Image (cartoon, grey):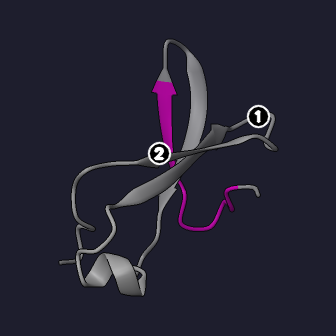
């Protein structure tokens, strides 16, 4: 699974660029607050490995 460029944001950490993306609309479970918010991060120059981070916060659309 790769993070698409469309809708992805860029962040630079210690000189290394990454792209991250949060779903625009929450999933059904996230909308009902049954599941926490999750977003995906990958290295900007060499895509292929994706880190999925799950937080303990609700989706920001709520």
The residue shown at (49%, 12%) is: 14
Q: Residue 7's spot in the image, x, y percent?
A: 53, 66
Q: Does the magenta stretch include residue 9?
A: yes
- Residues at badges 1 and 2 in contact (C-beta under 8 Å)? no
Does residue 56 lie above or below 13 as drawn? Answer: below
Does residue 45 lie above or below 62 as drawn? Answer: above
Residue 51 location, quadrant: top right
Q: Residue 60's spot in the image, x, y percent?
A: 23, 67
**Front-most of residues 6 and 51:** 51
Q: Residue 37's spot in the image, x, y percent?
A: 34, 61
Q: Residues within 10 Å of mark 1 (few under 14, many from 20)?
A: few
Q: Residue furthest front?
A: 34
The residue shown at (47%, 35%) is: 11
Please report the bounds of the magenta region as a residue range: 3-12
Total labels: the figure holds 2
Q: Does the magenta stretch include residue 11?
A: yes
The kind of secondary structure element at disc 2 is strand
Q: Residue 45 carries which label?
A: 1
Instruction: Using the numbered discs, state the Cα–Cα distance from disc 1 to disc 2 in whole angstroms.
Output: 20 Å
29 displayed left or right of 20 = left
Specify the principal SS of the magenta part. loop
Q: Residue furthest top?
A: 14
**Front-most of residues 28 and 19:** 28
Judged by depth in the image, the label closer to the viewer, 1 or 2, is 2
In this figure, which residue is indicated by the disc labeled 2? 53
- Report the quarter where the N terminus lies: bottom right
Q: Residue 18 carries which label?
A: none
Q: Residue 52's spot in the image, x, y percent?
A: 55, 48
């Amino acid at each position: 699974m790769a993070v698409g460029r469309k809708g992805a944001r860029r962040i630079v950490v210690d000189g290394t660029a990454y792209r991250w993306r949060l779903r625009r609309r929450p999933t059904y479970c996230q909308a009902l607050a049954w599941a926490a918010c999750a977003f995906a991060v990958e290295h900007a120059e060499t895509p292929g490995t994706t880190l999925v981070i799950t937080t303990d916060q609700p989706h920001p659309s709520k």
